[in-house]
Image (cartoon, grey):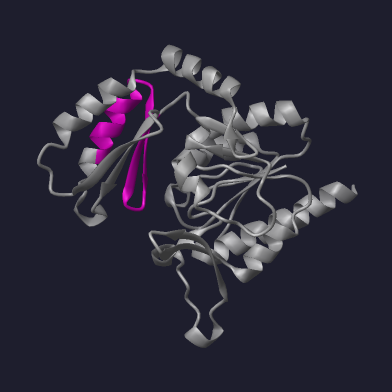
Amino acid sequence: MVASDLDRTLIYSAAALELTLPDAEAPRLLCVEVYQGKPLSFMTEAAAAHLEALPGAFVPVTTRTRAQYARVHLPGPPPRHAICANGGHLLVDGVSDPGWQATVRDALDAGCAPLAEIRAHLARITADVPWLRKQRTAEGLFEVLVVERAELPEAWVKDFAGWADARGWTVSLQGRKLYAVPRPLTKSAALAELVRRTGAGTVLTAGDSLLDTDLLLAGDRGWRPGHGELADQGWTAPHVTALAERGAAAGERILRDMAAAALAGSQA
């Protein structure tokens, strides 16, 4: 089973592509997401070919809501399973599994402060700040703030992260988005449930952010790109390959390596 984060791991906005080759040598791109009539997310055509060549099951694992995930159209047939909302929803043929929803609700009730407490605190500490552009609640599970990154005080993020940590929540800053996510809500928990249901053997994983740490640790092998929160912190693990490649080149390398590893495993 190949289970990978999407944004800034396999697919990239135009601003995150980090293409460094001369225009004449730049890779051909495939648009995989359109939003409000405009192309939004891309992968290289070579990456798309590696994705289609993956043997076995491919499972997208994303912090996106179900509606946001539905906008993404990857090459090949639609994946049978997907994990959305940072593990809050386990999709089976595009439909959220109600049994998993109940499991998630029980875990959140027992393991962290309620969402209402986090929202109330955020309302107090973001009143009249100039760097906040938007705030929303994702799937009734966690908070997302859209910020002006250059104006966001590092001390504010550190203080909020410490406050949230004491209440069982994780704070992750990814590009212009700051996530506040309850600690029991993890990609790895949903992946473990999917592995249990399917009986999958070897699991390959990839991700770039703090919210992908548990996903990477849950795999038999993992990859992280040369950009993102984990790269900035120098994070890795014995079974995780820390790539030098950044941007779309990293996504292409991850899928190439995963396809080779999955093929080798299937022939063993």
Q: Which percent across, then down, holds residue 62? A: 51, 43
Q: Is 151 inside the magenta-drawn segment?
A: no
**In the depicted structure, whether residue 83 falls above or below residue 98:** below
Is 142 placed above or below 4 here? above
Q: Residue at x 75, y 31 (%)?
A: 198
Q: Is residue 63 visible?
A: no
Q: Residue at horizontal 47%, vertical 18%? A: 105
Q: Report which quarter residue 51 is drawn in.
A: bottom right
Q: Would residue 146 appear left or right of 234 to someone viewing this image?
A: left
Q: Identify the residue shown where x is 47% and y is 51%.
A: 231
Please give left or right for residue 132 compared with residue 260 in the image.
left
Left or right of 264: which side holds 65?
left
**Residue 167 falls inside the magenta stretch:** yes
Residue sticking out furthest to the right: 268
Left or right: 250 with respect to 108? Answer: right
- Which residues are drawn in magenta? 157-181
